[in-house]
Image (spheres, rainbow, N blue to C red):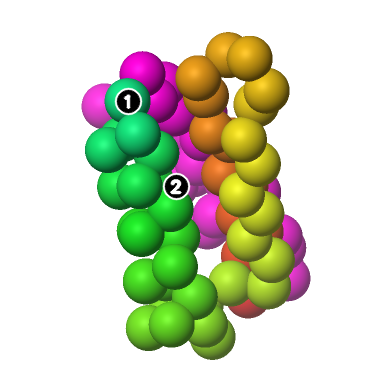
Amino acid sequence: MKSIINELKKIDTRKNVVTSIEYECPTQEKEDEVFDTVREILVDDLDSFSKITYDIVPGEQKIKVEVIQHLK
């Protein structure tokens, strides 16, 4: 099966890839897991992306993480 994203990434020009993930976090432990993962990316992989945001969705027990990567 072909991946739509992989097919689009093959186009030879500079591009930005925006990934948005919304996590269901019914417990504080799940919130901590998402936060710790984002923090590790910031510490260990800073050059791999141009922007990363972390937003807690009020009243919904959700966290939204968005990452923008520059690709050639």
Neighbourhood count class around disc 2 (C-alpha, 10 Å): few under 14, some 14–19, many 20 upward? few
- Quick check: 54 above or below 48? above
Helix, strand, or loop for circle 1?
A: loop
Residue 47 drawn at (x, y percent): 54, 85
**Amino acid at circle 2:** Asn
Residue visible at 52% across and 57% down in the picture: 10
Disc 1 or disc 2, which is closer to the eye? 1
Which image quadrant is residue 2 in?
Answer: top left
Residue visible at 37% across and 71% down in the picture: 40
Residue 50 drawn at (x, y percent): 68, 73
Residue at the outermost top position = 60
| Range of residues picked out in magenta | 1-26
- Quick check: 52 above or below 47? above
Residue 32 drawn at (x, y percent): 35, 47
Helix, strand, or loop for circle 2?
A: helix
Residue visible at 69% across and 66% down in the picture: 51
Q: Nearer the viewer, residue 46 or 4?
A: 46
Q: Nearer the viewer, residue 17 or 47?
A: 47
Point out the image quarter for the C terminus: bottom right
- Magenta stretch holds residue 67: no
Residue under label 1: 27
Which image quadrant is residue 44 in?
Answer: bottom left
Position of 23 with respect to 14 (left or right) is left
Q: Nearer the viewer, residue 13 or 31?
A: 31
Residue at the outermost front position = 28
Residue visible at 52% across and 82% down in the picture: 46
Residue under label 2: 6
- Magenta stretch holds residue 11: yes
Residue 24 drawn at (x, y percent): 41, 21
Mark 1 or mark 2: which comes first in sequence? 2
Res. 20 visible in picture: no
